[in-house]
Image: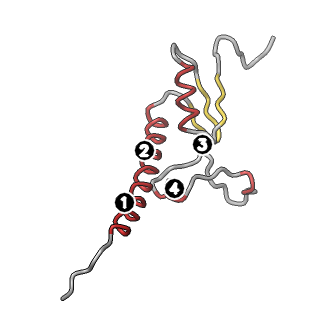
């Protein structure tokens, strides 16, 4: 029985594909960990039957397979280092709008 022969080109292509899938998986894992471990509120863009889907956010197919979901809005409650946290969240969720809620400055009922 002849052994299959693989060229260096095949090995490089397979390595590139596996690396891209692992990279996207790492991004999905970081995003899920940020949503799980944060005190901020994340509004996930989920499918609503019968709704107009033209304004829906999307993630790529590989990250969707890893369980990632698009985030439409993040409500942040500021703490001691909220500016660094905001930059980190902007990097992880570029599709999301981030609203910083200052609980002492903004009241739901204006005078």
Residue 53: give x, y in percent of width and height.
72, 57
Kindly report which numbered mark, 1 or 3, lies closer to the viewer in this rendering.
Answer: 1
Residue furthest out toward the front? 8
Q: Nearer the viewer, residue 29 or 91?
A: 91
| Label disc, if present, on residue 71 of the rendered structure | 3
Of mark 4 and mark 3, the one earlier in the sequence is 4
Of mark 4 and mark 1, the one earlier in the sequence is 1
Q: Neighbour class for label 3 at 10 Å: few (<14), some, many (≥20)? A: many
Q: Nearer the viewer, residue 14 or 82?
A: 14
Of mark 1 and mark 3, the one earlier in the sequence is 1
Residue at image point 57% right, 36% down: 42
Residue 81: give x, y in percent of width and height.
51, 16
Residue at image point 43% right, 38% down: 33
Relative to residue 98, is residue 106 depicted above or below?
A: above
Q: Which residue is mark 1?
A: 15
Q: Are marks 2 and 4 in contact (CB under 8 Å)?
A: no
Q: Which residue is mark 4?
A: 64
Kindly report which numbered mark, 2 or 1, lies closer to the viewer in this rendering.
Answer: 1
Task: Report helix, strand or loop for mark 1.
Answer: helix
Of mark 2 and mark 4, the one earlier in the sequence is 2
Q: Nearer the viewer, residue 93 or 46?
A: 93
Residue at image point 61% right, 51% down: 46
Q: Which residue is mark 2?
A: 29
CA–CA distance between discs 4 and 3? 12 Å
Instruction: Indicate the colouring scheme.
Output: secondary structure
Residue furthest out toward the left? 1
In this image, 98 relative to 25: left or right? right
């Amino acid at each position: 029985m002849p052994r299959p022969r693989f060229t260096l080109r095949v090995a490089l292509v397979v390595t590139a594909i596996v690396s891209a899938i692992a990279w996207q998986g790492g991004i999905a894992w970081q995003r899920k960990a940020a949503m799980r471990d944060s005190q901020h509120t994340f509004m996930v863009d989920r499918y609503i039957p019968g709704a107009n889907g033209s304004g829906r956010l999307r993630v790529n197919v590989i990250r969707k397979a890893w369980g990632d979901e698009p985030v439409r809005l993040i409500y942040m409650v500021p703490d001691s280092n909220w500016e660094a946290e905001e930059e980190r969240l902007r990097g992880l969720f570029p599709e999301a709008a981030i609203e910083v809620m200052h609980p002492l400055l903004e009241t739901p009922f204006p005078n």
